[in-house]
Image (cartoon, rainbow, N blue to C red):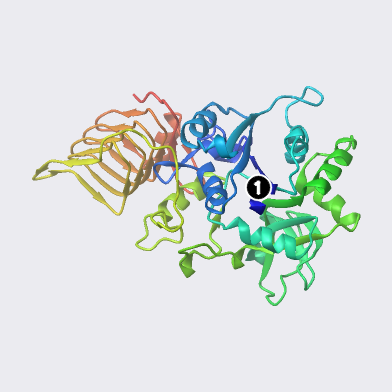
Amino acid sequence: MYHDKVLTMILAGGQGKRLLPLTKDRAKPAVPFGGRYRIIDFVLNNFINSGFHKIKVLTQYKSDSLNKHISRGWNLSSSIDQYVDLVPAQMRTDGSWYQGTADAIYQNINQITDESFKHVCVFGGDHIYKMDVRQMLKYHNKKQADLTISAIAIPIELAGEYGIIEVDDDWRLTNFIEKPSSTPRHIPNDKTKCLASMGNYIFKSEKLVEELEKDAQDKNSSHDFGKNIIPNMLKNNSRVYIYNFSENSYHGMLEKERGYWRDVGNVDSYWQANMDLLAYSPELNLYSQDWPLRTFNYNFPPAKFIWDEDERVGVAKNSLVSEGCIISGGVISRCVLSPMVRINSYSSVCDSILMENVNIGRHSQINKAIIDKNVDIPPYTEIGFNREEDLRRGFYVSSGGITVVPKGAIID
């Protein structure tokens, strides 16, 4: 099977500063999403569902939570040479941590050269989307490309927030601009949109090794794919093509799901992406049996809803409730609950994300909040109603008005 000649390398060492305080104690790919998943689960499922079973996950920043999740939940069959291997930063070159995305691959170049891989997929581990990678690889081979970059069409007025790609009519790369200050070139046949890089690459392995070795010798380089490797390949006339993600499809995909991709780079976008899951027919369908979403399975009991006495009623409306949760005489509306959350009597939680092992005390009121794991909310507590009071307590409040209670917070 030709997929056996393809190595997948997932970049999962990023700090995710814009997602603080959720990334204070964990790498961004390890942040919970959708109740029972981690962000990294989506890219891993994309490759497994696409038939790619040789995967290296490169970690660095506060990786303990990520390491535990991968080692417990992603065990493939080593007897037939399938693996999801963790590759911690080892300072293999000059004794330093990764200096950029390209340096992360360079410091692990032995993973590529030790076997005769024909292609290398270098994907980020911190985005939410579904993708059949086989179609991108087929396009890569059809174009006989040295490098293929997946890109998503965005409104041209948002160009300044992304790494922007310009192409000719054959979708060959002509320019790469990091967060342009002026209006970039529109995509072929649509003047209202431009192309943003998704940070997903497929390289010919020999070309990747060649470019990484040249970049490593450049002392002025940032050792980054977007800032250095891709512009250098453009200068030396390498065959760099762009794959239009909106053309990708997967088994069982609904048309409304086409082109769905979220960066979840800050608290507001992360909260919104979780809330989007609660729609009657969401753009990201967690329930498709044709494109299963695997993760670590907790050995917890089923969720339970108890009490039906006047105002003491255990109710969940338009919410995702994970295993082990107990809704004990309280009400949740438009919420995403991770495992082992307890909602006690007469409390109300709206438009919120509650992570593992959160306890909401009686008569508490929670609105538009993200409560990280292992937090005990005392009775009669209000969160998300008074910005100044939330800040006084040491909580983070986003520009969009989302209050974040950090992991393990002690609340008076």
Furthest residue to the left?
309
Q: Position of residue 126 (x, y in %)?
A: 58, 44
Taking depth in this image into account, of 160 and 64 the one nearest to the observer is 64
Asked if residue 219 lies left or right of residue 104, the reply is right
Query: Would residue 254 be seen by someone viewing this image from the given angle?
Result: yes
Taking depth in this image into account, of 115 and 57 the one nearest to the observer is 115
Query: Would residue 28 be seen by someone viewing this image from the given angle?
Result: no
Asked if residue 30 lies left or right of residue 186, the reply is left
Say few, some or many: other residues with alpha carbon within 10 Å of mark 1 (under 14 / 14 to 19 / 20 or more): some
Tally of numbered tags: 1
Give the quarter of the image for residue 393.
Answer: top left
Amino acid at circle 1: Asp
95 versus 10 height, above or below:
above
Q: Which residue is mark 1?
A: 4
Q: Position of residue 198 (x, y in %)?
A: 65, 54
Q: At 67% across and 51% down in the image, what residue appears?
A: 200
Q: Position of residue 154 (x, y in %)?
A: 63, 64
Q: At 80% across and 70% down in the image, what residue appears?
A: 168
| SS of the residue under disc 1 | helix
Give the quarter of the image for residue 131.
Answer: bottom right
Give the quarter of the image for residue 329.
Answer: top left
Asked if residue 88 lies left or right of residue 205, the reply is left
Q: At 57% across and 29% down in the image, what residue appears?
A: 63
Q: Position of residue 227 (x, y in %)?
A: 79, 47
- Please state, as top left, top right, bottom left or bottom right, where the C terminus lies in the image: top left
Taking depth in this image into account, of 123 and 363 the one nearest to the observer is 123
Furthest residue to the bottom?
189
